[in-house]
Amino acid sequence: EAGLAADIAAETTRATTAETANATAITAEETRALAAEAGLAADIAAETTRATTAETANATAITAEETRALAAEAGLAADIAAETTRATTAETANAAAIASETARATSAETANASNVTANANAITANALAITDIVSGNTDLSNAAVTLTRGDSSTVATTLGAGISKADNKADAIASFRDANGAIDEAGNGVGITSVVLKQVDASNAEANGEALGNVKDGADALADESVTGNTFLNFFRNLFGN
């Protein structure tokens, strides 16, 4: 029993010492853990503050960028709409101008083609006329000259002046009247049914030998004798007049 008591006492001492050492170690670990946890809590609080600040700044920057981008997009949309309107207007005007120019050019080309054809025909006819003249045939029925309104060529100018001069001379000599007695102004002469001669000054007229033959010769002889003093002729001149 004494041995058991000693063993129990020794075990009690060892156990108490071990328990004391464990209690000391637990206290030390608790102190360390609490200090570490406090440091971690401080670090977490600091990171939370930093992150919150950064997130707030990011949110502000995102809002500002969104506002800027929306404004820029609205401006671009307005510019695109304005450019679309301008381009559409310009394209419409260009299309109208192209259509107008196409119509004008087509009309001019058609007229030019007609003129080329007419001129080619005229050249052919004129070549035939020249051939006739060279061969001694004076029939100019093959001759042709093609003129168009507004033509400023020498041929057109010469013919126009000649026709106008001839027309003025004809009007000075006589009036050309239609069936109702009115002066015909048609210009083509189809309606003319009568010609009324105007006063003609024949003081400087001379007898034409080819037309009058011997009559002209006799008239010339009488004129010569009027200055010779022939009394017989003078008698009849005084009686009847020259």
Image (tube, helix red, strand yellow):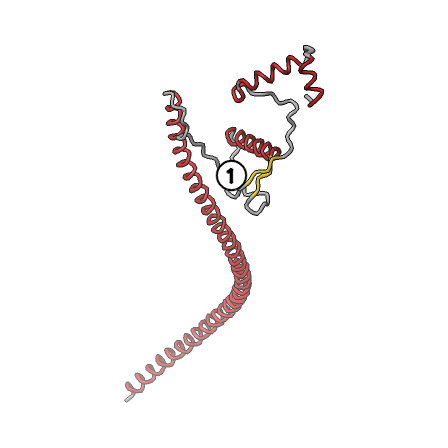
Q: Residue furthest top?
A: 228
Depicted 6 relative to depicted 139: above or below: below
Q: Position of residue 237 (x, y in %)?
A: 69, 19
> 123 above or below 114?
above
In this image, 50 relative to 2: left or right? Answer: right
Write down the residue under mark 1: 149
Q: Quadrant of residue 238?
A: top right
**Residue sitting nearer the eye, 5 or 169:** 169
Three-letter residue code for mark 1:
Arg
Of residues 47 and 59, which is closer to you in this image?
A: 59
Where, quadrant-wise, is the C terminus in this rendering?
A: top right
Is the residue marked by circle 1 packed among few (<14), some (14-19), or many (20+) residues within 10 Å? few
Residue located farthest toward the right when viewing the structure as drawn: 238
Q: How many marks?
A: 1
Residue 171 coordinates in the image, percent (x, y):
60, 35
Kindly give the residue lying farthest to the bottom in the view shown.
1
Q: Height in image: 187 above or below 77?
A: above
Residue 74 at what x, y percent from top left? 54, 61
Quadrant for the N terminus in the image: bottom left
Q: Residue at x 47, y 74 (%)?
A: 34
Picture quadrant where residue 127 is located: top left
- Counting from the top left corner in percent of width and height, residue 56 is at 54, 67
The foreground one among 149 and 82 is 149
The vertical placement of 63 against 138, above or below, is: below
Q: Secondary structure at mark 1?
A: loop
Identify which residue is drawn at 59% across, 43% down: 183
